[in-house]
Image (cartoon, grey):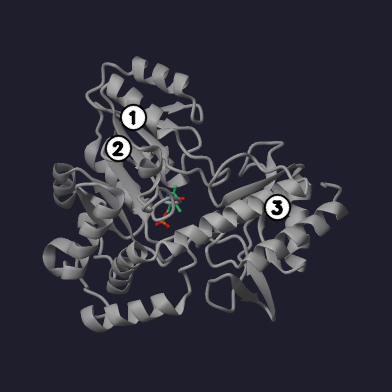
Amino acid sequence: MYNNLKPILESELAAAKENGTYKVERVLESAQGREIKVGRKKYLNFCANNYLGLSGTELLEKASEKAVKKWGFGLASVRFICGTQTVHKDLERAVAGLVGAEDAVLYSSCFMANVGLFQTFFGAEDVIISDELNHASIIDAVRLSKASREIYKHMDMNDLEEKLKASAGKRLRVIATDGVYSMDGDIAPLKEICDLADKYDALVMVDDAHATGVMGKNGGGTPEHCGVVRRVDFITGTFGKALGGAGGAFIATRKEAAEYLRNRSRAYLFSNSLDTAVAGTSLFVINHLKKHPEFRERLWENTKLFRELMKKNGFAVPNAQHPITPIMLGDEKKAVEMAKALFDEGIYVIGFAFPVVPKGKARIRVQISAAHTKEDIESAVEKFTKVGKKFGVV
Ligand SMILES: *Cc1c(COP(=O)(O)O)cnc(C)c1O
């Protein structure tokens, strides 16, 4: 009886509109890129996870055409029946090499990779110890596993140690963390986490969605950045952000763990093979980036320039390094209205307010890309300053 459901949905949606959590989707009339078209107007885009600037490019369009030409559009099969092609095996090897793991297993998305991971390895006799600000997909994946869970305060190593001590009786303990946190761009202290894991015989899982291809000298992600490659037992990552932006994901891990996933992971076994366009293009991207460090170099130059210019112009920019750059405003209404004013000036950024971020920590989040030119960055800062003055922020 839909009549029973309808009023519930209506009142929930009305409440969301009231408290500011209602989501409106902006419809693009162009491909993804440094500049996007919304309606008749063009906007400089500062809110995509398109860190290396590859998404929407002709380069990847060509690579995906080539992949589909060679491997066909789709497989109509799961991996273990007749859905494994050379391109899947090659991509698994390539991504394992990129992040410094022994092997990797492909998933349709990082959300599913996280679900697959906790569900497969951890049961009722185990505990997952999770950072309080972990991504929604980790939180849900942890809930879907039969393991018990402990939450530690964000990046608080003393609290993590307490939770490790308190769970000494468990068969397995695993620490779960984002590599980079998407609201602040802060990087998990993986060295300290791995040291605690060693001390208390725990495993370490890192969700590196915002870092694979981005962080580390060779784009190996936060484990490379923090100098703990091979000390991290499980890395999940996505091809849907820096590495092309279409979708697809992986778990990179030890040899036996990968073998076990291929045998037991329900999210892997009972879901279609990663599509050929994504598999072929992701493989192309990983190989291409090896020969073209300039994508990452440009990203860091742009990030540094934007952070410096914003600080110079009086904005509150926390000290971090990632291209995710929060401009702290505090006031909820200001964050949302300033983002709107910037949009009117041709700069597409998003304002985040409670409950997405803590009360009093409202902000505009800027995401820098290698696709941006120096002029784009300068133009964004100029518009920020103009709008910021109007709102009394600088
Ligand atoms: C974006 C994101 C995901 C989801 O990745 P998909 O491949 O789009 O499912 C998972 N974890 C984190 C930390 C993310 O930022």
Front position in the image: 219 or 30 = 219
Q: Residue at x 66, y 62 (%)?
A: 377
Q: Residue furthest bottom?
A: 69
In this rendering, is residue 33 above or below 349?
Answer: below
Q: Which of 6 and 284 is in front in this view?
A: 284
Q: Which of marks 3 and 1 is in front?
A: 3
Ranked by sequence position, the earlier of labels 3 and 1 is 1
Q: Name the residue under label 2.
A: 232
Q: Residue 309 carries which label?
A: 3
| Pointer 1 residue Cβ closer than 8 Å to ligand 1 | no
Going from the N terminus, do you reach mark 3 or mark 2 first? 2
Element under label 1?
A: helix
The x, y position of residue 379, in whole percent, is 72, 65
Q: In which quarter of the image is residue 283?
A: bottom left
Q: Mark 1 points at which residue?
A: 194
Q: Is residue 125 left or right of residue 220?
A: left
Q: In which quarter of the image is residue 281?
A: bottom left
In the image, taking residue 116 as reference, residue 36 lies left or right, namely right
Q: How far apart are marks 3 and 2 (CA)?
A: 36 Å
